[in-house]
Amino acid sequence: MPRAFMFGSITLPAIAWSQAVAAQPAAPAAQPVAASAAPSQTARTTTYDAAYFAQFAPRTALDIAQHVPGFTLDLGSTQSATGSVDVRGFAGTAGNVVFNGARPSTKAETLDVTLQRIPAQQVVRVEVGPGDLFGSDYAGKSQVLNIILSQQSGIDANVTVSGKRRFTGYTDPNVSASAAIRRGPSTINLSAGTGRNKQLEEGTDTLTDPATGELVQFRRKHNTYFNRDPSLSASWALERGSDSAFRLNARWQPSRFDLFQRNRVTPSDGPPHDDNLHQHYRDPVIEIGGDVTRPLAGGAIKFVALATRRKRHDFDSYVQRDGLLEDNPDVVGGFEQLIDAKRNETIGRVSWTRSNLLGLSFEAGAEAALNSLDDHTTLAVIDEKGDRIPIALPIADATVKEKRGEIYVNVGKTISPAFRVDGGLNYEFSQLKVRGDATADRALKFPKPQLTLDWKPGGGWHTQLSIKRTVAQLDFYDFISFGELSTNRVNGGNADLQPQRAWEFRLTAEHPLLGDGLVKLDLGHDLISLLQDRVLLCDDKNVCFDAPGNLGTGRRYFAQLTVDAPLGRLWKGLRAKFTGTLQRTRVDDPISGKPRKFSGFFPDWQWDLTVRRDAGAFSYGFEVNDNQRFTFYRTDEFDTNFNRGAYMTAFVEYRPSARTAITLDFDNVLNTHAARDRLLFFPNRAESEPGIDEFRDRNRHRSIGLTLKQSFGGGGVAK
């Protein structure tokens, strides 16, 4: 898993690059049908045949999903920098894509990865419709993409070979391959990839006294980050009908990450010296899942099982010297930290669906989950003699266990061809235990109702209103204390952390534009209680740490406009997609008591523009985006991240044959710098004035990539 990019010296913090089952039975895999390049519509869905996407020469199902007009991929499963999944249960990772009407039984693998390993030749068509068509996991979603795969026997495969040249001249190679083997109702998907991503970066840190503006320290840094995430994935499906299916899937990823930093530190009152930061992380993950669907009482019963196992072995080392490397200096100190942890999750689920029960679509089910974390953290300072002196952390060795259960029922009714109502109630109950350096027990219960109104008033308009209550998943690593050697700070653990709850209100309106284009407006409001943010926690010796904690009530408002416009009337093959978001967040700060924004990536505005032209064997285009700066409001600092201008990528693709594509891509076309401005308070923000202002500038410069994609086989859609 790619990590946040970390830069830093042991004296002040790092900078992060700121770039920013179905309520109706699932449809069986489809036989090839006569293809059409024009989309077709029913009362509730829009269908795009494979022929529609021929103009984009897709190689994988991901390429197809990215070219569905007005559709934005929701990856579903998301991960934090510690590797923990931060969504609750199985339903929380649903995303907005299904395959033959059913969702994949995985949490560790995001939808883009799943889509990438399906050859485009296997896709017969895609259907876009409201979430209620595909079950309670998708309730309230205005758009869900149903990818219909071919039943034609045969083998289809893709091989991708790429290289990316960094500004230093280093070339980062990668190879990936996927294959789909189909025999009658049985399909096997296999995929593997090297998953290499080596980034090189340079920059400066300027530390000043905020009161006088005088220079305190200057640093010149060179960072090398190396993610190596090779992976092996396999899945098998036996699909004989909407109520008769067996599926198995597995994924193994022996993830590793290494960072090496050269840091020349020049204090204002002393000679320069060379320091180094090393990070060596080994975080493998393995996941096995599957599901079985069988007919029952006029409907279908589905069993889902999923087991995910993660290990974390993260070693950090900071070396301090008394001079420059060319002068053979002595090591005069430093720090070391080792985190050893195991994070496990096991989920079992059963559901029964029936498309018509007393005139209603009906789904009921239950889910049980067991989550655990076993963490051991050691932090030490290294003195001039090389001795390691342990630093006591408030919660460094602990286990966290959660037993969670949930029952739910959902019903829906089509009132008229243009109007539908769906509603449901989930009831969740859990027991959470923390043991080790801290002891905490609590039982939690949450009713989670939801209601969705879907209306097509005519004239091509489609609107949807949804209201639901959600409960966030706790990141179990928030219970544990650990140091950040790149930032010279300690994150305290909070054994009493509670999951935040929210009432989410959504209103969506969309309308076709210029033929197969789409304009869509999304409005939203979140009313959040026990908002998870940062608080000040003190131990029994009155030593205080910044830690995760619950604040009071938070509010979020947003409006997002998406315009996906075919511009062939201006220039044949031209298409543009614009997405713009305005949002406002407010919560009372725990230190000042005054209203402020939420911590983290909640910019007041952000936008993205993609322009592409397809002309015969050639395609070319660019993407440019930007967002307002955003701040992490820690109790001892304001940590603000931003790009110093818009960020741009571009590409040119040539297809010498229907099975071959050669792509030249350009990253950071505008040579945009990333920046981070940190105001540090001592000992915390209860002091009225900051003690240090640290401004960091980073640049990875432009890079150029060359990719060859080759397709094989012909067992998919009939040509």
Image (cartoon, rainbow, N blue to C red):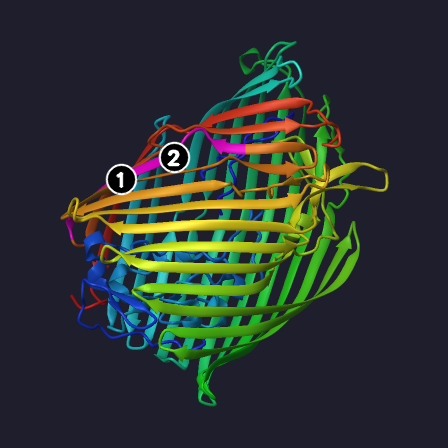
Is residue 285 shown left or right of residue 672?
right
At x 21% / y 60%, what residue is drawn? 52
At x 51% / y 58%, what residue is drawn? 286
The percent position of residue 685, horizontal first and vertical second, equals 72, 32
At x 55% / y 59%, what residue is drawn? 504
Numbered tag placed on residue 562 in the rendering: none
Is residue 489 found inside the magenta-colored segment of the image? Answer: no
The percent position of residue 546, horizontal first and vertical second, equals 71, 39
Using the rendered view, name the quadrant where residue 241 is placed.
bottom left
- Position of the C terminus, as image quadrant, is bottom left
Residue wearing tag 1: 651
Counting other residues with Cα less than 10 Å from the Cα at mark 1, is it few (<14), some (14-19), or many (20 or more)?
Answer: some
- For the image, the number of numbered tags is 2
Residue type beneath disc 1: Phe
Asked whether the viewer can see residue 664, the reply is no
What is the span of residues highlighted in magenta in the rendered image? Answer: 641-657
Residue wearing tag 2: 647
Residue type beneath disc 2: Tyr
The percent position of residue 96, horizontal first and vertical second, equals 42, 62
Name the foreground residue: 261 vs 3.
3
Q: As drawn, which residue projects farthest toward the right?
A: 541
Looking at the magenta stretch, what is its main secondary structure? strand
Query: SS class of the residue under badge 2?
Result: strand
Query: SS class of the residue under badge 1?
Result: strand
Name the foreground residue: 287 vs 84.
84
Is residue 642 found inside the magenta-colored segment of the image? Answer: yes
Of the two numbered discs 1 and 2 in the rendering, the one whose residue sits closer to the viewer = 2
